[in-house]
Amino acid sequence: DAKTTQPPSMDCAEGRAANLPCNHSTISGNEYVYWYRQIHSQGPQYIIHGLKNNETNEMASLIITEDRKSSTLILPHATLRDTAVYYCIVRVNNQGGKLIFGQGTELSVKP
Amino acid sequence: SQTIHQWPATLVQPVGSPLSLECTVEGTSNPNLYWYRQAAGRGLQLLFYSVGIGQISSEVPQNLSASRPQDRQFILSSKKLLLSDSGFYLCAWNAGGPYEQYFGPGTRLTVT
């Protein structure tokens, strides 16, 4: 399974863009990059996923480098409610599609 | 729309007692189902997953077991709880393929 590396913590000012990096240098060609977040004491929430093209939805944008060895999750206008642990996951496409969670990045959005 | 339920929300059990946590999904059929555990201050650990009725795959050796008696029901059990079984237990589902997983609200288990 491909591994991911994320910074343990980041701060962001409210209203500014939050850019969360993730390294996945051993990703294979058919593995997707997924992003989830977990607000304290809640279940993880799906944010976005992609294979090799950049993706955007109502929550965030996902930028994947051309070599697919890293990606960045962008929250365009962070709010206090975006304070959470953000997980970057490379999904195994066999064995039931299980997700392997790392330690994630704890994002603190400050007023 | 699909919803996922877990109960109970919180549970305090003595060491050596049995455990049964239940998860049900509504609004979909033949989902993949997953049990995760999150120890305090740590990331999520996948415990079991199931791609169909009666089909269970275990990810880590432990004193827990899982069963899927019906298509949209997933049960996590233990015959004798250990202190190390304390944690936040999360059930999740997805529709198979490269689709996102949706998580339930979780059960916070404290073994005393």
Image: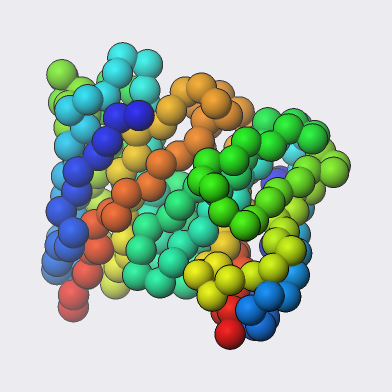
Residue displayed at 50% across by 26% down: B98
Which residue is nearer to you in this view: B84 or B56?
Answer: B84
Q: Position of residue B94 (x, y in %)?
A: 60, 37
Residue at the farthest top position: A29
Q: Is A102 left, or right, of B15 in this rendering? A: left
Residue at the farthest right position: B70
Residue displayed at 22% across by 69% down: A108
Q: Where is residue B29 in the image (x, y as percent from the top left)?
A: 78, 34
Relative vertical location of residue A3 with respect to residue A95 in this rendering, above or below: below
Residue displayed at 23% across by 63% down: A107
The color scheme shown is: rainbow
Relative vertical location of residue B46 with respect to residue A56 in this rendering, above or below: below
Question: Can residue A35 be seen from the camera position used here?
Answer: yes
Q: In which quarter of the image is residue A82?
A: bottom left
Q: Position of residue B71 (x, y in %)?
A: 81, 38
Which residue is nearer to you in this view: B40 or A52?
Answer: B40
Q: Position of residue B12 (x, y in %)?
A: 65, 82
Question: Can residue B4 be seen from the camera position used here?
Answer: no
Relative vertical location of residue A104 with respect to residue A99 in this rendering, above or below: below
Q: Is A58 left, or right, of A4 in this rendering? A: right
Across the whole image, how many numbered discs are drawn on residues?
0
Q: Is A61 left, or right, of A36 in this rendering? A: left
Residue displayed at 32% across by 49% down: A102
Task: For the C terminus of chain B, give its image quadrant.
Answer: bottom right
Q: Quadrant of residue A26?
A: top left
Q: Is A73 left, or right, of B101 in this rendering? A: left
